[in-house]
């Protein structure tokens, strides 16, 4: 292991090498990056893949720059690239101030400039309108069909809509609109004789356990036979005798009860909890001392509408907004911090199930063959629209500061306030941190 102390001059030389790396990335035109087998389009991806000009730059400076970039990009689409460009366009000026007047003056100048430009863009924020969306579509998409699909997505969506872009196995591109909380499960065998079961104002119970004896749900069945009301029982699984009894009585028309067994595996481990939130129902569990025979008398709730098919269950209801929001925030936070791809996929699946208003765009081979980056293009467009809706927009032509204006890609006419503000804040924070460093220890791990 080789340890080296980088004094002020060596560290500043290292910073200049890092700036040259960024400028090298900026000079790479098009989507293809020659130093990698991966085809990438964004400046951020190119910078991530670029091999730094020195090992110290790769180990010390680049991680600090990437941290600022990812913080900006995570807040708003486009913020990462602007942060990278702002740092590249501004840092050398503050490095010269440091040499002439010292690190404290350079740091305070950076803080002052940030406040000035942040105040400037705050004055130019405008409400995000339809004309801005049309402008973004024009700048993002090249082909008429892509523009048409983007316009269609916007026309059938609202600020609460969750939009999913994924690759289709077919040739055609399909847009699907779905309402209701959808859970991908294979319900009980009793559905085999009736492909789709549907009920409105459904009496519902959620049981986190197995129903072993018909006597446990006797009161429920008795009530269902008297009223002829639709019932749904969600549970882990049931005994064969219980399942057969339900199948026979449903076939006779004595009752109208749908049984949904979710099973017990990694995909359905927490599904009953998610279902209970959508239904405003209590989860009946022996772990909490609950008895099924008592619960079927006391813990039945009425759900607006439930549809049960061979592949999924769709619940249309008005759950407690506070509980649902809190639960989604929890799942999103778990998804962000979990680096296991399979676990992250499970969280994403749960989040989708708990989103009632979904537009799904399945991109077909007809578009991918003409533009391999089309899925990334749509994904970026949708994230950009969300950022604008959240924080409104800033017309690029209203920005007087040339350095900032030059840091925004040429084809962009409107930038979300969050993308611009936080890219400014993170790039200037990075500049202040770097000008204050007088030297450091370099550890050569190779």
Image (cartoon, grey):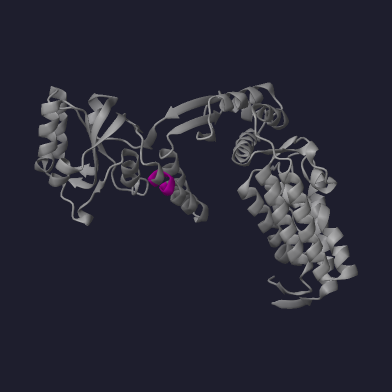
Q: Nearer the viewer, residue 174 or 36?
A: 174
Q: Position of residue 377 (x, y in %)?
A: 65, 35
Q: Residue at 85% across / 71% down in the picture?
A: 102
Q: Position of residue 114 (x, y in %)?
A: 76, 55
Q: Which SS does the magenta portion mostly show?
A: helix
Q: Is residue 365 above or below residue 426?
A: above
Q: Quadrant of the C terminus?
A: bottom right
Residue pushed farthest right? 100
328 up-or-down from 186: above or below: below
Give the residues drawn in magenta, as a range: 323-327
Measured from the top left, where is residue 436 in percent x and y?
77, 69
Q: Nearer the viewer, residue 5 or 81?
A: 81
Residue 18 horizontal/vertical position (percent): 79, 60
Q: Is residue 7 above or below residue 323?
A: below
Quadrant in which the N terminus is drawn:
bottom right
The answer to whether 148 appears left or right of 9 in the picture is left
Task: Say whether residue 326 is magenta.
Answer: yes
Residue at 10% over, 27% down: 226
**Residue closest to the eye, 247 or 234:** 234
Which quadrant would residue 76 be assigned to in this image?
top right
User: Relative to 173, does residue 114 appear above or below in the rendering?
Assistant: below
Residue at 74% across, 63% down = 61
User: At 12% from the left edge and 34% from the top edge, which residue is drawn?
Assistant: 221
> Residue 390, can we see it?
yes
Q: Is residue 100 magenta?
A: no
């Amino acid at each position: 292991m080789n340890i080296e102390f980088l004094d002020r001059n060596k560290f500043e030389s290292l910073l200049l090498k890092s700036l040259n790396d960024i400028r090298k990335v900026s000079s790479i035109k098009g989507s293809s990056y020659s130093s990698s087998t991966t085809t990438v389009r964004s400046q951020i991806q190119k910078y991530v893949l670029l091999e730094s000009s020195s090992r110290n730059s790769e180990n010390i400076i680049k991680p600090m720059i990437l941290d600022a970039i990812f913080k900006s990009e995570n807040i708003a689409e486009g913020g990462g690239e602007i942060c990278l460009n702002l740092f590249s366009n501004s840092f050398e000026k503050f490095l010269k101030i440091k040499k002439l007047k010292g690190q404290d003056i350079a740091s305070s100048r950076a803080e002052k400039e940030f406040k000035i430009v942040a105040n400037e863009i705050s004055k130019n924020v405008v409400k995000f309108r339809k004309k801005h969306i049309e402008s973004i579509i024009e700048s993002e998409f090249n082909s008429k069909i892509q523009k048409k699909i983007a316009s269609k997505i916007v026309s059938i969506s609202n600020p609460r809509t969750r939009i999913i872009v994924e690759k289709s196995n077919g040739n055609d591109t399909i847009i699907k609109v779905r309402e209701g909380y959808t859970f991908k499960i294979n319900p009980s065998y009793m559905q085999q004789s009736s492909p789709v079961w549907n009920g409105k104002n459904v009496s519902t119970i959620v049981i986190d356990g197995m129903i072993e004896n018909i006597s446990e749900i006797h009161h429920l069945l008795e009530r269902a036979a008297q009223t002829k009301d639709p019932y749904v029982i969600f549970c882990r699984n049931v005994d064969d005798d219980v399942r057969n009894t339900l199948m026979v009585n449903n076939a006779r028309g004595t009752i109208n009860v749908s049984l949904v067994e979710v099973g017990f595996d990694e995909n359905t481990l927490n599904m009953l909890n998610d279902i209970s939130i959508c239904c405003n129902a209590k989860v009946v569990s022996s772990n909490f001392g609950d008895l099924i025979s008592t619960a079927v008398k006391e813990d039945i709730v009425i759900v607006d509408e439930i549809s049960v098919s061979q592949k999924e269950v769709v619940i249309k209801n008005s759950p407690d907004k506070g509980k649902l929001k809190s639960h989604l925030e929890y799942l999103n936070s778990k998804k962000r911090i979990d680096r296991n791809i399979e676990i992250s996929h499970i969280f994403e699946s749960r989040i989708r199930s708990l989103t009632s208003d979904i537009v799904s765009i399945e991109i077909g081979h007809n578009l991918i063959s003409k533009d391999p980056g089309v899925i990334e293009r749509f994904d970026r467009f949708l994230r950009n629209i969300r950022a604008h809706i959240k924080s409104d927009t800033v017309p690029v032509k209203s920005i007087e500061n040339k350095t900032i204006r030059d840091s925004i890609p040429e084809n962009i006419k409107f930038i979300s306030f969050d993308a611009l503000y936080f890219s400014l804040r993170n790039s200037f924070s990075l500049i202040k941190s770097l000008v204050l460093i007088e030297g450091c220890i370099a550890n050569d791990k190779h």
